[in-house]
Amino acid sequence: MAQQQAETQTAADDVPTSEPIVVTGSRIARDTFRTATPVTVVSAESIQDQAAINVADALNDLPSFRPQATPATTAIFIGNAGANLADLRGLGAQRSLVLVNGRRFVPGTVAGSGNSPGFTVDLNMIPTALVARSEVVTGGASAAYGSDAVAGVINLILDNEFEGVRGSAQYGISDEGDNEQFFVSGAYGANFADGRGHFILGGEYADSNGVGDCYTREWCAEEYGPVANPIPQVNGLARQIFLPNVRPSTASYNGLFNSGPFAGNEILPDGTLIPHDYGTYYGPPIFQSGGSIDPTHGFYVEFPLVSAVERYNLLARASFEVSDSFIPFVEASFAHIEGRTTGAQSRNLGLSPTDIGIAADNAFLPDNLRQQLVDAGVASVRFGRIANDLGHSKGSVERDAYRIATGAEGNFGNGFSWDLYYQYGKTDYSQVGLNTRKNREYFWAIDAVDEGAFLNGTPNGNIVCRQVALGNPDAAGCAPLNLFGENNFSPAAKAYTYGTVMQETELSRQVIAANVSGDLFELPGGPLGFALGAEYRVEDAEGTTDPDSAANNFYTSPGSGITGPAVRVKEAYLELAAPLLSGVSGAELLEINGAARVTDYSTSGTEITWKVGGTWEPVNGVRFRVTRSRDIRAPNFFELYNPSVASFQFLVDPQDPSGASSLTSVRLSGNPGLNPERANTLTAGVVLSPVQGLNLAVDYYNIDLDDVISTLGGQTILNRCASGAVELCDLVTRSNTGALVALNNTLLNLNQLKTKGVDIEASYSLPVGNGDLTLRALGTYVFDLITVDQAGEVDRAGQNGSPVSQESGVPDFTGRMFAEYETEKWEIGLEAEYISGGLYNATQIGPDQDGYDPTLPNSVSDNSIDDYWYFDARVAFRPLTDRPEVEIFARVDNLFDKDPPNQFPSSYGVTNPILYDVVGRMYRMGVRFEY
């Protein structure tokens, strides 16, 4: 609270260096100036200044993070709804290792859900009230911590020695009156047994109501989207054009015929036909601009811009000093998280007979239309329908996470220390998807006939499902469904064709570990430090799902069962730190360090990781550091054993000369044949402190990751297959005529993922009047974020968009600046965030780029996103500064209510919520106390 540094700093500036401590990235106790690996510290005060109700909210403000999985990116994906994950360097949350007090935390996510990978830590589970600081190592650290630490490590350090009582309560609401937030937290700490024992307890409750659909924001209600142009050689326009007021061109809320004698006509609820108004439309599917009688875009309506999340958590810890050599402890935590969102409604675009095909004898067709089909000799017609009247899927996900850790630590004497612990954690994951369409029953119910006419040629007025008339026993209970015009279906048909998704999964992780560290003997620069240890882990997941999900019978967000042998890991490591010189001319400090780890996986065998690094301080105030490491990430349980799950994506088939998009079945699945990812990492930098109060750190990073575990995405598989990656063509299923039918988007060990860039941190503080002025800036330049396979490479550095069914890139530069003035009673802060301009899609080309030609297959009308500035402001007043301390605070985010770019469609709507704010101006206010 009062008079404490509040913002993000390098570890060397944030943590006192009067005595050695263990800093993330190393297991050896050293003062922070001797660390060779860059460590960024987010203090508890920084989390408070952000008015963050989640640790992830504060971490995601760092330029080195890409908030790929947050409540703002849930969209129509029900799985893991509301999760908050940490994604360093844009390499994926599965490559960022999350620790609590240096120990792996319990995983909380399942696979197959948008941008939330399975078996990762949800930061919702950790109470902010007990977090003393978060240490972020933005580089490989596998030699110190094992698998997953490829992009870096996020180590949440708890305030184990806290004494007293602290608490906070705050309320937040957007300028639009939504995104309402309620948050309370508290912590208690006390000694007992004459100070030999210590106990802490902390917890919090947060309720975020989220933001409604696209039509709650004017910028989104402009309904920008892609309109295909198959004739660029005729009209001179790009093949894909972004236009406002977009609607499907092959489907409508009432229903639209796409073939046969009444193609291009919509059918109204009373059975009459009206010509469909195609507005601005250049050719075959699937979107148009303007026209249409539908009041909203069926792909943008209902699903929230920010999903609702309610959660609470508790953590307790007790320790007792039996002696200096034996201090046992026990720690336990519980967290409950519930996320809610709205999934997709039934969307049939009438693009092929395998979509909705209306037979000529369909009993719900008006007599005059049925006769036209008979007269024309047409057996069936294609029919497009956006079933808003049948409703959207309503999803909720509940997760209960339990964890207990017990162990002991102590000193052997002569500078040697040890620790030993056992930890067990599990997460009970429950997913429910109400009102979800069942594919088989839906198509059976649509195919309705007059029973008498079908059986003996004499109509009897009894409308039944064709499969019932055929005597199919599996179709027993089928209730015919009338899709001709909105709200013409019967309750029985709705009940038959829609069901509830159910998934129950238990994730567990057990760890037993032992470590020893100390100083071996004196070198010219100080004692030779060492650390060695061993760890054994067991990671498992078991889950069940409903029969329809197991049969891939649900249209969207199906459940997924999972089983398989537990993943067992045995590890041992050794680390050394050798100070060669100190306090001599040309070397105030010269130290080298190294570590090696041997890991044996039950699934993939033995791996060796290592690191070597050094620091050199030629004079006071100038420090150079460098680290080279070999890092790994082994496939997790879901990547190995997740069963095949079907979804649908809009894909453009390169073999289709029209260039039109089509809705294609895409199956996602695990792969037990996966191998570990292997990374070579280099970091090198300099830390300057030329004058008192001024600090500057510049660090270069280069991560080269081989055998990447990832899905390519449906569109990439098609494009790469067409470009010559023959091995990917095996994942594409086509009909006898060559038409695209389905894709298997299985996990693969891809060739490479490479990223490099520079992190910059600067701070300056000085006394001004009765207080202190602090200026601070953080920035990340990303030179490369390259995915490489046998057909070529795609560099997503500078890609600010998140194209549909593809990952978001990262801007070339992201910066965040802070200015703070603090007195004993007052604190005022102004923050600015800068996002450099970039491309919408690195695989497309627009008019502003060299080589643009509208006839190119990847031409787009606009591929450039402007640079962006956001501003935040905060103020705090302390009516009481002695214990008890009381602080009243207020904060405004997005001070000038800046709208996001809204002409660049993504899987989340018209913008990229990973980079840009979709809420608008947001107010938070509250009170904190401590005594």
Image (cartoon, rainbow, N blue to C red):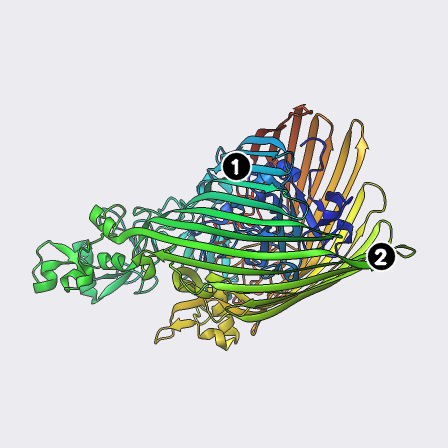
Name the side, left or right, on which 407 lies relative to 673: right
Locate residue 75, reporting x and y percent: 45, 49
Q: Measuring 58% from the left and 52% from the top, which residue is drawn there?
A: 421
Q: Measuring 48% from the left and 71% from the top, which residue is drawn there?
A: 673
* Quarter of the C terminus within the rendering: top right
Q: Is residue 696 above or below residue 844?
A: above
Local packing at callout 1 (Cα closer than 10 Å; few below 14, some 14-19, many 20+) is: many
Most foreground residue, 101 or 415: 415
Name the side, left or right, on which 120 lies relative to 463: right
- Tag shown at residue 525: 2
* Quarter of the N terminus within the rendering: top right
Name the side, left or right, on which 7 lies relative to 123: right
Q: Which residue is mark 1?
A: 204
Most foreground residue, 570 or 292: 570
Locate residue 125, reporting x and y percent: 51, 45
Locate residue 731, reporting x and y percent: 44, 72
Residue 169, quarter of picture: top right
Name the side, left or right, on which 415 lies relative to 365: right
Q: Is residue 384 above or below residue 300?
A: below
Most foreground residue, 809 or 673: 673
- Amino acid type of the residue tagged 1 in the rendering: Glu
